[in-house]
Image (spheres, grey):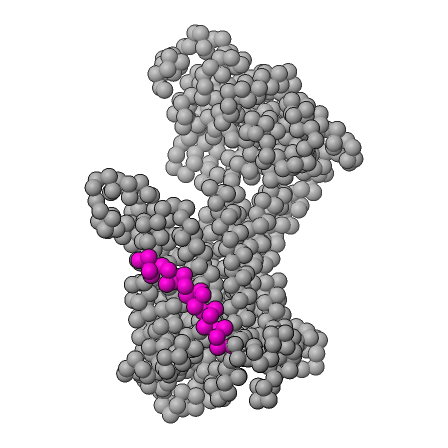
Amino acid sequence: MSIEIKKLNVYIKDNHIVRNVNIVLPEKQITCIIGPSGCGKTTLLKTINRLIDSVEGVKIEGNVFVDGQDIINSGTEITELRRKIGLVSQRPCPLPMSIFDNVAYGCRINKMFKKRRQLIYHVQKNLKAVGLLEEVKGRIRTPAARLSIGQQQRLCLARSLAVQPEYILADEATSALDPISAKTVEDLFVKMKENYSIIMVTHTLHQALRIADNVVFMYLGEVIESGPAERVFHHPQHELTQKYLAGAFS
Amino acid sequence: MKIARKKKLKENVAKLFMWCAMFVVFGLVISVIWTIFSKGCKAMSWNMVSKLPGGGFYIGKEGGFLNAIVGSLYIVGASTVLGLLVSIPVVFFLNIYLKKGSKLAYLARLAFDVLFGVPSIVYGAFGFTIMIYFGLRTSLLGGIIVITLLIIPIFIRTMDEATRNFPRDILDASFSLGATRWETLKVVLRQIAPGIATATLLSVGRAIGDAASVMFTAGYTDSIPTSLSQPAATLPLAVFFQLSSPIPEVVDRAYAAALVLTIIVLLLSISGRFITNRFSKNKV
Amino acid sequence: MFALTLLAIMLVAAIAIGLYLKSASVIQDKSIWSLLFSSEWRPMKGNFGFLPFIMGTIWVTLLAILLAFPISMLTAIYLTEYSKPVVRKFVFPALDILAALPSVIYGVWGVLVIVPWISQHVAPHFVEFSTGYTVLAAGIVLGVMVIPLLISLFIEIFSSVPVELREASLSLGATRWQTTKKVVLRKTIPGILASTVLAVSRAMGETIAVLMVCGCVIGIPKGLLDACYPIPALIANNYGEMLSMPLYESALMFAALILFAVVLIFNLISRIILYRLEKTEK
């Protein structure tokens, strides 16, 4: 159960954004994609759950295998693919509804439960998993937009988890948060890797150092180096990686 | 998998409805244009646009509707100039002299939006009461005044939008170089020139097509007005009045006038699109 | 500049006051209640009951919005949520044309296309005879006229919904349609309502096109195939005769005042809502 990317090229209009990427994202581990901004990290991430489809003028070449199935070329059911791959975006964006309905949204969309009791139990379980259940007690029916930014981000995580994905994609999920909330969310990711394969885009090297099992370093759309975190951080093979780690790009 | 199929079905049904809606919109456009062009082209001749109606616009079989073309041009031309003279200072005042978030600016924008929504028949009735108050009869002047009132909100709204989108940094840059407000105005003017152009085209389009307001104020006549105090014919009223005539030749005049009006309005609309597309590339 | 701005703002008040002064004599003479709710219209005898005209306006406006709303909504959704740029390249100019055409042109179209269609193909199924100059004809013509306005307002509102919100919904396995229905539409309900109110007020004041196809028979319409006589048509049709009787003129100015007041209120409400939404989005 892993994601394998082969000879992937993504063009948006005339720009070659992702260039010939070949990587494997291993199961039940945290893979961090690092690199300077504008290097195609987010585009790569959005290709994995095909959110890239709604970008105008996009062209994809190559293969992305999710659970052994090529999601680019075979007629994959995209909604099912997206259910299987959760997404946590940079800015938390609660849907315009109550806290409960936010978490229940995906379950209802996918008709996961027949009985209301099951749904309530499921929502509570997922709120608990992100440590929100206690914090929102008594106001679970109030609009989600009233939560603090940090709480909103955890709510978004709970919302993703509620549809029982196998993978979690996180796009700089902690960058908009205050340090304490960021730490909470980061700890959640570490805990979650027991059950999920996590692919994380981050531009803070420190975060990658703390939590990554695997590291993919991208530069100008190409993967320069990838492998176990230990090796990439401490014995980088490529000159560009060494420069980036030494802070040459920032 | 059953759920996925159901989802997909709903998605496709929704899409089908949307396609139908767009089909209806296209159908309407084609129907309207085709009706006007097919009737108008049959009725069209050089006499139509070059001669005055002979023997009265409602019953006379001879001639064309030159009176309406000239009347419309007089009214639209004059009111566009007047409208610009009033609107440009107001837009500058709103965007440069007033600070962002000013109460007065908010109120003014609200007022212009509301004025924009006021039906033209109400403008006509209001204009009419004023004219009576000043002892004016239906005249070219009355038409010009009412059409000016009618298009000022359009001018201001459209220009205001163009000016609001424009980067205030340029203002700061200009001020910081020691420029006065008047010099800064010139910088701004160059920036919003396309906005003014679009606003003008929109206003001219509205002004030339509006019938309800000039009905009261400009009246209708068979001849070309030679002074401001004479009544003036207009294109939309030429269509409206002559369409209901029992005489086929007169009805033909209405069709031909409708064709001319439609062509003018379409040209204005197309050039409006052309300007916004071309000019916007040169903006910051 | 300040004076000009003030002057322009004062125009709103000026219109209201001007129309009120003119209609004051009929209001004093008859009381507002009887003007609004009496259906007897005999100008020569001095009876001015506006009910038939008010009902005519309501019928025509409601029908127009009922027809235009679903078409505009679906088109706007397609254009913002689904379409490729190619589609927009074709649809936008078409909408431009619809928006640019003057009222009188729609009137000609109504007289030549809609009216005969109703009298020959629609009405025979329901009534023995109809000229085609009916509530239905006026509603259809007016509906077509508000479509471009509604679509452009809807597109503006839908575009203000952040992309991230749509992505959040899509990434949970929702289809485009589910996302539109449960997130985009839900988020924009106030804006949709405000735009619709705006379109209603626009439809109410349309004169020439409606005048040409409504039939202009005084009476409260009982169905879609009855003729009607909306307020703007009443004003436009009688401007010539009214000067002969001061009270008649006053009554027609009262009609203009009603129209102005309703449109003003509707406009104020919807604009204030739309302004507020615009602010929160930024």
Image point (61%, 69%), residue name: C58
- How many numbered marks are there? 0
User: Relative to the observer, which residue lies in front, C66 or B147?
Assistant: B147
Image point (57%, 74%), residue name: C230
Q: Is residue A159 among what the camera can see?
A: yes
Q: Position of residue C140 (x, y in %)?
A: 58, 68
Image point (38%, 62%), residue name: C8
Q: Specify the quadrant of the image occupied by residue B124.
A: bottom left
Q: Is residue B275 among what the camera can see?
A: no
What residue span does the magenta drawing correspond to?
C1-23
User: Relative to the observer, which residue lies in front, C48 or C173?
Assistant: C48
User: Relative to the observer, which residue lies in front, A159 or A234?
Assistant: A159
C11 falls in the magenta region:
yes
Q: Position of residue C81 (x, y in %)?
A: 54, 46
Image point (51%, 35%), residue name: A52
Q: Position of residue A63 (x, y in %)?
A: 52, 28
**Seen from this angle, which residue lies furthest bottom?**
B55
**Seen from this angle, which residue lies furthest front?**
C28
Q: Specify the quadrant of the image occupied by residue B38.
A: bottom left
Q: Specify the quadrant of the image occupied by residue B170.
A: top left
User: Relative to the observer, which residue lies in front, B167 or C255?
Assistant: C255
Residue A37 position (above or below residue B61) = above
Q: Position of residue C281 (x, y in %)?
A: 49, 42
Q: Is residue C107 left or right of residue A154?
A: left
